[in-house]
Amino acid sequence: MTRTIQIEELTKKFGKFTALDGVSLQVKPGEVFGFIGPNGAGKTTTIRVLLGILKATSGKAEVFGMEAWKDAVEIHKRIAYVPGDVNLWQNLTGGEVVDLFVSLRGKGKSNPQLRERLMNDFELEPSKKCRTYSKGNRQKVALVAAFASDADLYILDEPTSGLDPLMEQVFQNYVAEVKGQGKSVLLSSHILQEVERLCDKVGIIRGGKIIETGTLESLRENNADTLEKIFMKHYGGEQV
């Protein structure tokens, strides 16, 4: 079975600085993989390599069995990506941006019913210009566009940044929905309870190295351990 994501001994250097140092992880079809670590640990760099934005110094990074850097155009037809800080075209409406993003996927037809349901659930006003949106509303535009896409992999890098707790719950419902459809999700989140609730497996990264990976059950030392306790065991007071 081809894994959705296959990373082996991935290294990325910027001059003398090593941002990723032998990172290995796998995400299977239908799996939600939580990717956590303190700020600057290498989460976003890993994601940018997977997206073909950065070229790895060494190692393997494959998506759908294709090379992330060489086959980026084909890979992007099957993925949806949400960053933690969304920038939009100021003079377009939220609805126009959603439609543009969905059309760029290059796969399948748009689903107006799903689009409308997402707009309602995320309480997004699609007729407003993007320049009027708050950070939270810009984030909603990206999330609606992602979940309205016919994607096989959702790469979500701090996707709920700026959302209130009610919208975080809506987000979690849609992650569960796409998982139920057999889609894969790579979720980088600073909300450990969210990761614990949604993810089948978790990878913990620090200083560009994966220090623990596995199911929550395999990471727990006893049944009382939470993901927060596991994280704090490694990082103390560092910010996730």
Image (tube, rainbow, N blue to C red):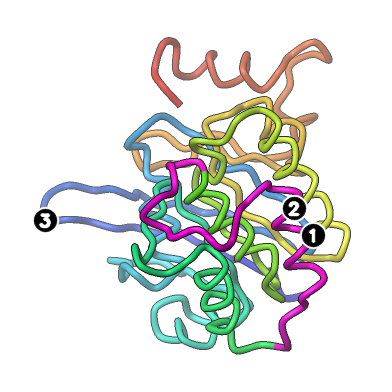
Would residue 213 appear left or right of 11 to someone viewing this image? right
Q: What is the C-alpha distance between the residues marked 3 and 2?
A: 47 Å
Cβ atoms at labels 1 and 2 below 8 Å apart: yes
Spot occupied by residue 38 in the image (x, y as percentages of width and height): 41, 29
Say which amino acid is labelled 1: Arg
In the image, is residue 192 above or below residue 20?
above
Cβ atoms at labels 3 and 1 below 8 Å apart: no
**On residue 117, which mark appears?**
1
Which residue appears farthest toward the left when viewing the image? 15
| Quadrant in which the N terminus appears | bottom right
Report the residue at 36% width, 57% height from top. Answer: 87
Disc 3 is placed on an element classified as loop
Report the residue at 54% width, 44% height from top. Answer: 188
Determine which residue is flagged by label 2. Answer: 120
Quarter holding residue 221 = top right
Spot occupied by residue 196 in the image (x, y as percentages of width and height): 72, 30
Instruction: Please state which of residues 210 and 103 is positioned toward the viewer in this rendering.
Output: 103
N-terminal-most mark, 3 or 2: 3
In the image, is residue 68 above or below residue 41?
below
Q: The magenta stretch spans which residues?
A: 108-136
Disc 1 is placed on an element classified as helix
Spot occupied by residue 42 in the image (x, y as percentages of width and height): 37, 44
